[in-house]
Image: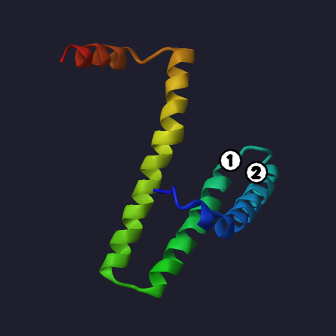
Amino acid sequence: MPYIPQKDRPRLDPLIDKLAEELKKIGDEYNKKEGGKNPTAYAGLLNYAVSRLAAKFALSTLRYWTIALLTGVLENIKQEFYRRVASPYEDKQVLKNGDVPEFEELARKIEKT
C-alpha cells in the first residue's frame, strides 16, 4: 500500500514530483511532434521509469523473493490505482452516459441473491 508514514514522504516527494514533471514535459514534446495525436508517448515514458526503478531494486538483490516482492507490489499498485481512481471515474461515467444493459441486469440479479 502506498500509505507510508508522513515522516518519510518529504525525502521522496520532491524526487517523485520532479520525475513526474519531466515525464510530462517529454510526453508533451512527443505528442506535439505528432500533432497532438500521440498520447501513448506518456505510457511509454511511465513504463520506462517504473521498469527502471523496479530493475534497480532487483539488481540490489536478485533472488526469487525480490522478483516475487516486486511483481506483488506492481500488482498492488495497479489494484489500488484502479480502486481509487478508475472505479470512481467509471461510476461517474455510468451516471453521465447510462449503464450497459447487461450490467444493469446483472446488478438486479445480484441484489436478489
Q: In terms of secondary structure, where does tag 1 sit?
A: loop
Residue type at numbered disc 2? Asn
Q: Is residue 6 left or right of residue 79?
A: right
Nearest the viewer among 33 and 45 is: 45
Nearest the viewer among 4 and 84 is: 4
Q: Residue at x 61, y 60 (%)?
A: 46
Where is residue 107 shown, x and y percent of the image? 31, 18
Q: Which residue is mark 1?
A: 39
Where is residue 83 shown, x and y percent of the image? 45, 41
Q: In terms of secondary structure, where does tag 2 sit?
A: helix
96, above or below 87, in the image = above
Query: Looking at the image, is mark 2 or mark 1 earlier in the sequence?
Result: 2
Where is residue 88 shown, x and y percent of the image? 51, 31
Tell me the quadrant of the picture where the C terminus can be found.
top left
**What is the number of the mark on residue 31?**
2
Extreme residue toward the left, this view: 113
Q: Is residue 58 left or right of residue 112?
A: right
Could you tell me if the residues under marks 2 and 1 are in contact, i.e. CB atoms within 8 Å? yes
Q: Residue at x 41, y 18 (%)?
A: 100
32, above or below 58, in the image = above
Q: Residue at x 24, y 19 (%)?
A: 110
Where is residue 20 shown, x and y percent of the image? 70, 59
Measured Cα–Cα span from mark 2 to mark 1: 6 Å
Nearest the viewer among 94 and 7 is: 7
Residue type at numbered disc 1? Pro
